[in-house]
Image: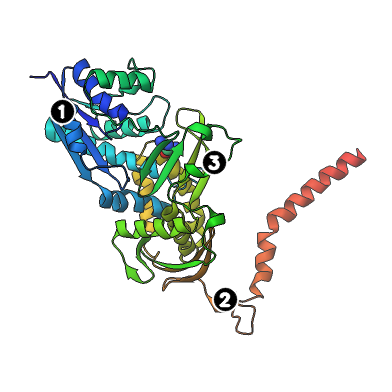
Amino acid sequence: MSKNKIVVAYSGGLDTSVMVKWLSQKYDAEIITVTGNLGQKAELEGLEEKAKATGASKSYIADLQEEFITEYVWKSLKAGTLYEGQYPLACAIGRPLLAKLMVDVAKAEGANLVAHGCTGKGNDQVRFEVGIQSLAPDLKIIGPLRDWEFKSREDEIDYAIKNEIPIQISKESPYSIDENLWGIATECGVLEDPKAAPPEGAFQITENPKNAPEQSTTVSISFEKGIPTAVNGIELPPVELVKYLNDIGGKNGIGRIDMIENRVVGIKSREIYEAPAAIILHKAHMELEKLIMDRETFRYKQDVSNKISNLIYDGLWYSPLFNALMSFVETTQEFISGEIVMELYKGNMTVQSRDSEFSLYNKELATYSKDDVFDHKASDGFMKIFGLPYRTICKVHQKEETANVVG
Ligand code: ARG
């Protein structure tokens, strides 16, 4: 009987394959692998057999796509979270769900340890470990990549061959890629030079806007209480809806993001993202809020969005502040129902039409035509009061200036 039971977050790649064997030896442990399907294209078929051939006693593969969209992506969309104004947080919202999967399996299997394959300078170790600690404070966590003896990919391959670990030694991609339904993140290789434009090969699901079709694509998106429910009038299940928008957005060159971002560990990194559905939906959702939400809530929500973005990025999904701020967000979404029509064209999106039964836009108030019902005379007194502090300031400051000149 092994002393320990370890649940390992497993992708079937070189690092996590080597990890399975390494952990079983180092900790005299029984290994259970877990893999979450968040819509990544990586091969899941045959993964269970592969894990077992590597020495795992059990292998879980969980299809989390629906849960990912409804419990994680939709919350982030309603909150309007784009980290540092750009990144839709695809990877960052996937990690807490994977952390929950690891905890669930560890509890079901009576495991005393969990392990992940993150490096010591990334954000994902933070999201996994803070997520796991928030859900299961007594579970011990191991991050072997931070301190094992292997210094290079070659060292790992040598170990794999010696230990008869099944690995596919394919031509190594120059990039590190993380993918799920909400977006793809690509870094490393030539992308590490911020002076260099990303080569075309760094993109997988988006057309170069220059080569996108000459014909635009018009798409209408319906929302109910802040959640997208239909595209072009056809109701779609959440996963299908996101896949469809990734497809048509990608074809029209929408969703490419090239940014320098601030990591949790204090360094700046350069990442390329492809997130057509996320970019389209954030834009459409924001347009609808502009039509429906009252001014003070809209302004306040911008600050809240920014705070929630930082919390998600920093791995604090399961924190009291995240929950509290999300309660605020939920309240604001009560009337965010309606339809936005957008035209997608060569990397750009333009709004064609906005419509909602809860629209606060009132044409009679907004118009400059004879139908105008706005009380222009009322503005006279309003201007006097609204400008009062500034008349006061100006007088006081002018007095000081005069005093300076004279004195
Ligand atoms: N920078 C992104 C984040 O922290 C993605 C991290 C993973 N990136 C990658 N290319 N493997 O959420």
Q: Is residue 109 visible?
A: yes
Looking at the rendered structure, the kind of residue marked 2 is Leu
Asked which secondary structure carries label 1, the reply is loop
Residue carrying label 1: 111
How far, Cα to Cα, is label 1 from label 2?
Answer: 64 Å
Q: Earlier in the sequence, mark 3 or mark 2?
A: 3
Q: Residue at x 34, y 45 (%)?
A: 323
Quadrant in which the C terminus is drawn = top right
Q: Nearer the viewer, residue 13 or 406?
A: 13
Label for residue 17? Answer: none
Looking at the rendered structure, the kind of residue marked 1 is Ala
How far, Cα to Cα, is label 3 from label 2?
Answer: 48 Å
Residue carrying label 2: 365
| Circle 2 crowding by C-alpha within 10 Å: few under 14, some 14–19, many from 20 | few
Q: x, y percentage for residue 361?
A: 51, 72
Residue carrying label 3: 198
Q: Residue at x 15, y 28 (%)?
A: 111
Looking at the rendered structure, the kind of residue marked 3 is Pro
Q: x, y percentage for residue 263?
A: 47, 32
Closer to viewer: mark 1 or mark 2: 1
Q: Residue at x 41, y 55 (%)?
A: 277
Taking the image as shown, residue 128 lies to the left or right of residue 5, namely right
Q: Is residue 136 above or below residue 348?
A: above
Confirm or reject: label 1 Cβ below 8 Å from ligand 1. no
Q: Nearer the viewer, residue 384 or 54?
A: 54
Q: Residue at x 43, y 71 (%)?
A: 356
